Image: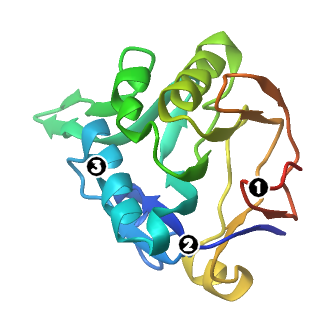
Amino acid sequence: MSIMMAQPSLLLNSYSFQDLGGCGMFMDTTWNCPRNATPQNIVGWILAAYNKSPNKHLHNVVLNFHGEPGEIYVGEAVPEVMYRGHYSPAKYNMIDPSNAGVVFSALKGKSIGTIWLHSCAVAKGLRGKFVCREIALAAGCNVVAAEEDQQEYWGPLAYLVLRRGTIDDYEGPVHIWTPDGNHRRFDPNGGHWNANRRN
């Protein structure tokens, strides 16, 4: 099943989901992010889409990135390296407790309905819920995120299964934060969402 998004909406897609078929999800505006994307870039691209949207309004912003509790990996600061048997893991540019409020404050006062964090386990634990609340308060909009790892369709299959303007359902418990920071459990799966209707 899937979640239908009111349009105009924006999807920002991680560099790591751009292989054969990509993620297979598309909004009115869909941009694939480069490997070196930063949190500031993410907010800058949201503002660019907002400024180009009819009547300067976005119903939804979908951030489709890898995640961990309280962390969203938007790009690589340093790529992974394997040299002569020695492995150095990648270092990531991420949205986390240290920057979520500051970075997303650039969206305050803009007409943006809901930010959907389509990432694994972002809302898990106190750290995860803190980051989601910080984004909602700073941006002045709803924020939706899940506690568990997320699964997406294989890209080519998603083209057949998902209609344009939809995202695939969340796995596990899902939460929503409102612009004033209030929080509750939330079940958007299989539904139709816009910011003027509270499910």
Whether residue 19 is situated above or below residue 91 in the rendered picture: below
The image quadrant of residue 5 is bottom right
> Which colour assignment does the render follow?
rainbow
Instruction: Of the two numbered discs 2 and 3 on the same chain, state the one appearing first in sequence.
Output: 2
Disc assigned to residue 8: 2
- Pointer 3 and pointer 1: residues touching (CB < 8 Å)? no
Separation of marks 3 and 1 at Cα, in angstroms: 25 Å
Kindly identify the residue that appears in the image at 38 percent across and 54 percent down: 46
Horizontal placement of 179 versus 138: left or right? right
Q: Position of residue 33 (x, y in %)?
A: 31, 59
Separation of marks 2 and 3 at Cα, in angstroms: 17 Å
Kindly identify the residue that appears in the image at 53 percent across and 55 percent down: 61
Q: Residues within 10 Å of mark 1 (few under 14, many from 20)?
A: few
Disc assigned to residue 36: none
Q: Position of residue 25 (x, y in %)?
A: 57, 72
Q: Residues within 10 Å of mark 3 (few under 14, many from 20)?
A: some
Q: Position of residue 44 (x, y in %)?
A: 28, 49
The secondary element bearing badge 3 is classed as helix
Q: Give the residue furthest to the bottom.
A: 160
Q: Give the residue furthest to the top.
A: 126
- The kind of residue on which mark 2 rests is Pro
In the image, 142 versus 89, the foreground residue is: 142
Separation of marks 1 and 2 at Cα, in angstroms: 14 Å
Q: Which residue is mark 1?
A: 196
The image quadrant of residue 94 is top left
Horizontal placement of 55 versus 152: left or right? left
Q: Which residue is mark 3?
A: 44
